[in-house]
Amino acid sequence: MMRKRAAAMLAAAVAAVGLAGLSAPAANASVYGDTEITGVTVNGGKSVVIGTTYAKTFKVTVRGWDDSGLADVDTDLTGPGYGYAEKSGRCESATACSTSFTFDPLVDLYNDNAGTWYVGALVDAKDDGAAYDERVGHFSLKRAGSLTVNASPEPVKKGAPITVAGTLKRANWETHHYAGYTKQTVALQFRKSGTSTYKTVKTVISGSGGGLWTRVTASADGTWRWYFPGTSTTAAVTVAGDYVDVR
C-alpha cells in the first residue's frame, strides 16, 4: 500500500511542477510536507558477505527528518541479476528507521546477484508527511572467498628454495559449493619471527582451479600466507599462515 501511495504522490508532484513549467523534483525531495530522507547505513557500513550454507541477516537504517518525527519506512533493495527485496518497518526514533533483511544462499541468491545494490526508501512522518528516494544509498553484496596455504619443506636450509602453494576459491550460490577462482591477483606475504606485521613479497595470478604456486628463497624463520584483496563481487580473504623454520 505504501508503495502505491508513493507512486501516486510522486505522480502528483511531477504533474504539479509540470503545470508550473518547472522540471520534476529530485529523487530526494520531499514528496509531501517537510519530510526529508538524509541517508542510509547498511550492515554497519560493511559489505554483506555470504557463503554457501548459512543465511545472512543485516540491518538497513534509513535516516531522515520531519518536524513531527518519523513513523514508518518501506525499504527496497535492488541489485544485479534482477535482485530485489522489500520490507516495511516502524521507526525506532524520530530520525531513524531500521529494517532487517535476510539473504539465504540456498533459496534467494544466484551468482549474478553479487555486486552493487541500491537502497530505495519511502518514509512516512507522524503528521502524514512523506518522502521517497529510489536511490538513497548503496552497498556491496559479495560472495565469500577461501584460501589455503602450504609452505615447504619444513625445516629448510638458509638460501634454499621454499615452495608456497595454495588454492583460491569463492562461494558458488548456485551449486552451494566453493569453486576455484582463476585469473586473480593474490599476494604472497611473509611475517618474520619476532614481528607482528606481514609484508607482501610478490604477487601471483591464480591458475586452473584457483591454484597458487611460487618459489622464494629461505632467508629467516617466519610465517607465509596468501592474501586476496577481493573484487566488486567477491570478498577479501586471507589465511592463517604456515610457519617455516630456517636453519
Image (cartoon, grey):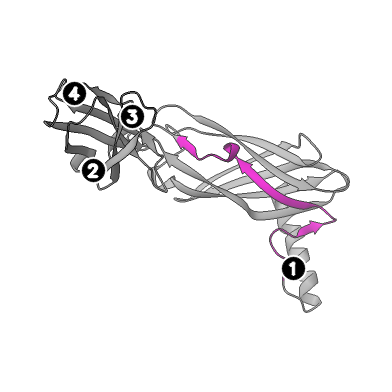
Q: Residues within 10 Å of mark 2 (few under 14, many from 20)?
A: many
Q: Which residue is mark 1?
A: 14
Question: Label 4, label 2: how many angstroms apart (C-alpha)?
Answer: 27 Å
Give the Cα separation between the discs numbered 2 and 3. Answer: 15 Å
Crowding at dot 3, Cα within 10 Å, few <14 / some 14-19 / many 20+, comes out as some
Disc number for residue 239: 3
Q: Which residue is mark 4?
A: 246
**Image-quadrant location for residue 19:** bottom right
Point out the tag, 4 or 3, that comes first from the N-terminus.
3
> Which of the two discs, 4 and 2, labels the residue nearer the N terminus?
2
Q: What segment carries the magenta color? A: 24-49
Q: Residue at x 29, y 42 (%)?
A: 186
Quadrant in the picture for residue 155? top left
| Residue topped by disc 2 | 206
Q: Are marks 4 and 2 in contact (CB under 8 Å)?
A: no
Q: Position of residue 119 (x, y in %)?
A: 60, 49
| Label whose residue precedes the other's in the sequence (2 or 3) | 2
Callout in the foreground (1, 4): 4
Q: Residue 131: image x %, image y %?
A: 76, 53
